[in-house]
Amino acid sequence: MGHAVLSQKTTKIIALGGSLDGGLSTRHALHGVLAAAQAAGATVELFDIAALDLPIYVHRKAPPANVERLLAAVRSADGLVWGSPLYHGSVSGAFKNAIDWLELLSRDDPPYLTDKVVALVATAGGVQGMQAINAMEQIVRALRGITLPLVTPIERAHQAFAEDGSAKDPHLAEQLTRQGTELVRIAGKLRGGR
């Protein structure tokens, strides 16, 4: 009697973040996590806040095509990476607006980010990046998601990356790699339970 071969779905990871001011540090950090996730066997995609050019979220307003594309990606993702610069003790307004559009996932079954793991990255001009991480963690919880315990607050982010986008500090590079690898591992386990 032959053995049945079960097809395994590839873990899908999407990243959401960046900034509108042309700063690259958040995008570089997201690329670092995504590169590790891809090396761990996941398919990856980045939704850059600036490129998305999202309108301000208005409840009960029909979403434009770029929002529909983001929502479809979030629905099909097993895990996410969120990255925001620290703005006044929290996430940027542009990042929060993108997250507000996820309200349209409320009527899904299951709703919002149920059973999805989210890795968190924050960039700061100074040393308070954990404040943005804490804000994002509260948002993930409100959207019924699960935060990856490994977080990456990046201090003095404007000095953290080389021109090619690589982390100057080997410890930071290792942290981003570990975060991406662990995200794929946990997302794969959660997907197996669905």
Image: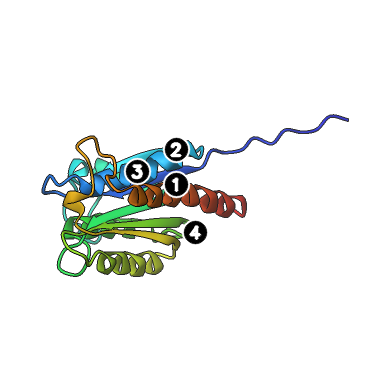
Determine which residue is flagged by label 2: 38
- State how far apart marks 4 and 2 are (Cα): 26 Å
Give the label, 3 or 4, closer to the camera. 3
- State how far apart marks 2 and 3 are (Cα): 10 Å
Determine which residue is flagged by label 1: 77
Q: Secondary structure at mark 1?
A: loop
Which amino acid is tagged 4? Pro
* Circle number at residue 32: 3
Give the label, 2 or 3, closer to the camera. 3
Q: Secondary structure at mark 2?
A: helix
Proximity of marks 3 and 1: CB atoms separated by less than 8 Å: no
Give the label, 2 or 1, closer to the camera. 2
2 or 1: tag closer to the N-terminus: 2
3 or 4: tag closer to the N-terminus: 3
Q: Secondary structure at mark 4?
A: loop
Judge the density around disc 3: few (<14), some (14-19), many (≥20) Cα neighbours within 10 Å.
Answer: many
Residue 129, above or below 172: below
